[in-house]
Amino acid sequence: MVKPSEITPATADIIKEGAERYFDISELAVITGGPSVGERFSGLKLDHLLFIGSNRVAKKVASQAAKNLVPTTLELGGKSPTIIGTNANMALAAERILFSKTLNAGQICLSPDYIFVKKDEEKNLISELQKAYSKFFPEPNSHNQTSMVNKHHLRRINSYLLDATKKGATVQSLGQDDDLDRNMISTKSAYVAVITITLINGFFSTNMFKKYDNMYKKQITELRVSNKGLIKRLSEYERHGVIVDVTMYQPDKIQCDDTPDITADGTRIRVHKASEYKFVALSRNLLKRWGGAFDYGDFILIRDAGHKDGVYQVRDTMNPKWVNVVDILESKGVEPYKFTNAHIFKLPWVDTQKG
């Protein structure tokens, strides 16, 4: 099961479309959605959870996973420092460093944030970086450059540059974006921030690594102790499923409210691609806030509903008059259907390979 970042919804949609086209749901399931879905995803009883992202989100992911003692691997932010030796080919080093730094506008894990170089080679390095940039991007600020993922991160990068300037640093612009006090509206910018540090007989102490290793071991021990009691209090989910009627609804103002493109949990959808999302609405008696067993963001398995059997996400609800009903979100033009005495289960406790 994979949950791509909600920051890049178009990419997430492509991944989901490819997975559904080439893989069975039991082999690869791609779950899309916002923070609420990510929170629910992190709380599933998985064999192992791998997270790649920020420290802030990692704390929430680890906290949710700890409730079920799910082993986690957290790949968080790094600085990827680059050290240039005294005998290095500066032109070649600059090209290789800049290739990594400009790949996806520096928005990858391997993008270096620091360059360590001898002080007397600083100007030479900057000159070679500028040459390499001109070689990679002969037309500054063209469409061949990648955008920052959103305005928030553009402002964050700009704030670093402004802060460095105020503290006496010299910022070398490799493109045409020389004005640091810009309105920060355009996201067509790729930045390369170079921090030069003189290295004279420097070395890294192994004691530093021992210090951090001991700190992490202590944190893990404390986490395990604090969750010993928690795991005993966790109730098991219903294994036998809930009997429901399965019907369908379409995103229009007749069947929904005045915002048919927004589900009850706040997720925005593309109306013309409604069927591709595999979202469902549950009658209120099935939702936790009204005393039920399910919540927004839950992944459910529908059985005994003919060609609509499969895995769906809970994202919506319906009129209070309905009881034990599941509505599958469909695109306009899909013929109405109804299945009685179907069953729904909360994943991942159901083996999707068996009936």
Image (cartoon, rainbow, N blue to C red):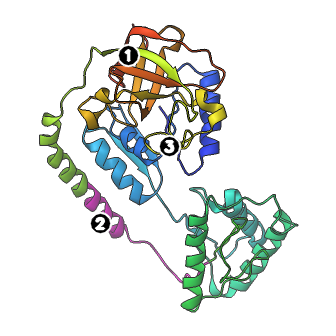
Count the marks: how many? 3
* Disc ID at residue 211: 2
Q: Amino acid at mark 3?
A: Thr
> Is residue 192 placed above or below 318 in the rendered structure?
below
Earlier-in-chain disc, 3 versus 1: 3
Q: Secondary structure at mark 3?
A: loop
The mark lying in front, picked from 1 and 2, is: 1
- On the rendered structure, is 259 left or right of 103? left
Mark sitting earlier along the chain (1/2): 2
At 36% from the left and 26% from the top, the residue drawn is: 283
**Could you say whether the residue bearing mark 2 is in a helix, strand or loop?**
helix
Residue 111 at x, y = what percent? 61, 61
Q: Element at badge 1?
A: loop
Q: Residue furthest right?
A: 138
Residue at (45% x, 57% y) in the render: 54
The CA distance from mark 1 to mark 2 is: 44 Å
Q: Which residues are magenta?
A: 195-217
Q: Which tag is nearer the camera, tag 3 or tag 2? A: 3
Residue that numbered label 1 is attached to: 351
Q: Which residue carries the number 3 mark?
A: 267
Residue 286 position, x and y percent, is 31, 27
Please tell me which residue lies in front, 229 or 84. 229
Q: Is residue 144 above or below residue 20?
A: below
Q: Which image quarter holds the C terminus?
A: top left
